Image (cartoon, rainbow, N blue to C red):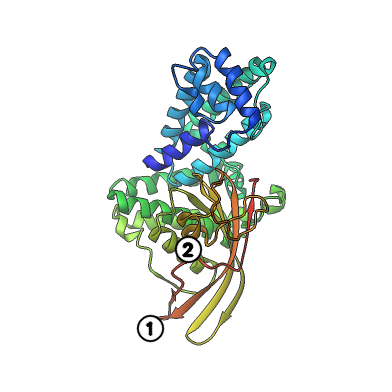
Amino acid sequence: MRAILLALIAAQVGLMHPAGADTLESDQSLRDTLPLFESNRCARIRDPAGQLSCGDPALQAAGARLSRAVEDRLSRIADRRLAVEENVEWIKDRNLSCGIFPGQGLAGQDFQFVKACLLKETEERIAILTDPDFDCLATDTTAGLLICGDPALAIADKELNAHVLGLIAKMKQDEARAAFNEYAGWARARDRKCNLADKDNVPLAELSSSEACLADYIGRKTAEIVAAKGDPRKVFRRSPASPTPDADAVDLCVAQIHAANSCGDFLRVSRIIQIDTEVSADAALVTAEVEMKVLSPFTVCSPIAAACTGSCWDPVSGQAKPTPGSRESLLVAQRLRIEKSFAFSKTDSGNWRCNTGALQPIELGIALSGP
């Protein structure tokens, strides 16, 4: 929980962009303009939006209220890493709409306009986040938009979320972390089952047939939790084996690799798409595309990059390849797509166990900057 909050705070104050010459010039202008710049040591923040929020009393107060609203929202939703992702995407959009661009400073004559824009955007965001009845309005996932647009689905999803939080509250910290991760996996499995994976650019009107599938999935999961009668072990008991070698099995395999390498503070798996499957009597090879989003910056060629994404990354081309000695970082909200084959073996019970213990090496990878 603390790591998730730190990721949100880092994104909110703008620690995702490196300093450039324009930014350094902006530092001096902001230093001369903002009353709290020196006392709050705002120069350590390498982003104009963060420096404005640090050095201006009104923006600082609004930022504090936004942080409380974000923290309150984290306490009432189960997929907390999705909330981090949503928040950093909002920050990117806010900065762009207010005329703040990566690596560029602010001209003195723009300060008042940018300040007014940041205040307006922040107040609107707080209004959304502080209304628990409209949590879905903060989502930009295809399934989330479909659920939000249907009152019955929205109520059912809110009920499922409440049940999940009630169970997880009974668990120890490590168990709770694993349960949160498993709940996130439910959503990805739901989207694959309901034909909503990789449908970000499809008009919602063309996906209305998926609503019945969403309702069925949410209903079955809710019934499963109710039948557990308050025992989280009957719900969150993720088996190391899967009934079939498919995208769900790959999802579990990636989750195991990420858990073993403590990747959850840095990355969120956003989707897994099955590309090809080769199956024999007792072995299988599933090739899949795995998309992840960066929640907290890490160096493009580092143990985290290798263990959690399967590769080092070239920050210029966006390709997955060695960049020894580079001190550049993958940025918050950046998307990474890798293609990899995962090996499985059939157990005596007829299920399939993942034999792939690491993401490295991968067959293909690309880093994307947008949502």
Q: Could you say where residue 295 lies in the image, as x and y percent from the top left?
A: 50, 45
Q: Is residue 126 above or below residue 201?
A: above
Amino acid on which the number 2 mark rests in the picture: Val
Amino acid on which the number 1 mark rests in the picture: Asp
Position of 313 with respect to 44 (left or right) is right
Q: In this view, does 230 lie above or below 365?
A: above
Report the Cα–Cα distance between label 1 and label 2.
23 Å
Q: Would you say the residues marked 1 and 2 are in contact, meaning their CB atoms lie under 8 Å apart?
A: no
Res. 169 in view: yes
Mark number, residue 254: 2
Q: Could you say where residue 10 lies in the image, as x and y percent from the top left?
A: 48, 35
Q: Which residue is drawn at 49% across and 44% down?
A: 296
Mark number, residue 175: none
Q: Could you say where residue 183 lies in the image, as x and y percent from the top left?
A: 43, 53
The one of 126 and 24 positioned closer to us in this rendering:
24
State the SS at label 1. Answer: loop
Q: Which of marks 1 and 2 is nearer the N terminus?
A: 2
Q: Is residue 94 above or below residue 201?
A: above
Quarter occupied by the N terminus: top left
Location of residue 352 by image quarter: bottom left
State the SS at label 2. Answer: helix
Q: Which residue is drawn at 31% across and 45% down?
A: 169
Res. 219 in view: no
Q: Residue at x 44, y 42 (%)?
A: 77
Position of 213 with respect to 229 (left or right) is right
Label 2 Cα neighbours within 10 Å, binned few <14 / some 14-19 / many ≥20 = many
Mark number, residue 348: 1
Q: Could you say where residue 149 lies in the image, as x and y percent from the top left?
A: 61, 42
How many callouts does the rendering have? 2
Label 1 Cα neighbours within 10 Å, binned few <14 / some 14-19 / many ≥20 = few
